[in-house]
Amino acid sequence: MNADFFKNKVVAITGGTDGIGKALVDALIQLGAKVATCGRNQDKLYDLQLLHSGKPLHSLVADVSNYNDCKNFIESTIGFYGGIDILINNAGISMRALFRDLDVTVIEKVMDVNFKGTLYCTKLALETIIERKGTIVGVSSIAGYRGLPGRSGYSASKYAINGFLEALRTEMIGHDVNVMWVCPGFTSSNIRNTALNKKGNSQGESPMDEGRMMPSEKCAEHILNAIEKRKRTLVLTFKGKQTVFINKFFPSLADKLVKKFFYKNGELIR
């Protein structure tokens, strides 16, 4: 990575208090970027400000499913720094429940945070990014390439993000704006602990083995490298790339492998 690429660039990151978002904030500040982030938890934002005291970090309490919150975040960032070079739509929420069991409001909530949050912030920041010939990033998922059982709403939201950004990328040809989406595999983060159950409540303890997953810091490093290289897409981990490949060319086999991975004795275990 070119150590000077991010220096003095204004980078707005949604959901910057946990997991991949926080790892991106930490890394970008070390690289000399001017960072803005938002999150729903005021205490976590305060801790983040203390951690980076004296560094260029603008933070705001915001729920990205709310248009006015997104408007406040983007407009305050532009007012604070004068513009935005890079927007990373990272804020997201997951869910874990079989479709036949869940209340449809669970899927609506996931779509509101994941897709609408990306939609709102991208729309609000688009003109300043065009002016600066910058970059728009969506943190998607392997679930945006392959629907995952027990995560129907999450998969739907990530498919929506991929399709939206692909359309926007085509519209931005000729404007020197790079639009990309990144798809981490299983990454150690807080998203599974806050995943919604069938009733829309946080599931609490994650059923996944965090110790076997890619660290958030490593994931952030890959994302920043992809931004610098102005890549179109980024699919992380061997299993992630394998899943995308098999699903594209051998979809029936992918059905069986995904079922085997997520189920044991007929029960959803992951």
Image (spheres, helix red, strand yellow):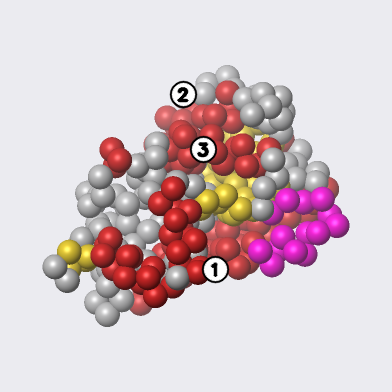
2 vs 3, front mark: 3
Residue at 46%, 33% (x, y): give it. 217
Q: Amino acid at mark 2?
A: Leu
Q: Kindly identify which residue carries mark 2.
A: 51
| Residue at image location 78% in from the left, 59% down from the top | 172
**Disc 3 crowd, CA 10 A, few/some/many (<14, 14-19, 20+):** many
- Left or right relative to 238: residue 151: left
Quickly name the residue at label 3: 220
Question: Disc 2 versus disc 3: distance between alpha carbons?
Answer: 18 Å
Percent from the top left, x then y, of residue 249?
Answer: 50, 69
Specify start and end residues of the magenta stretch as a single range.
Answer: 166-179
Q: Residue furthest right?
A: 174
Q: Is residue 194 above or below residue 26?
A: below
Q: Name the quarter where the C terminus is drawn.
A: bottom left
Question: Which numbered tag is attached to residue 160?
Answer: 1
Q: Position of residue 68 (x, y in %)?
A: 59, 58
| Front-most of residues 198 and 41 | 198
Q: What amino acid is labelled 3 in the image?
A: Ala
Whichever of callouts 1 and 3 sits on the residue coming sooner in the sequence is 1
Q: Tell me the SS state at disc 2.
A: helix
Query: Looking at the image, is 157 positioned above or below residue 38?
Result: below
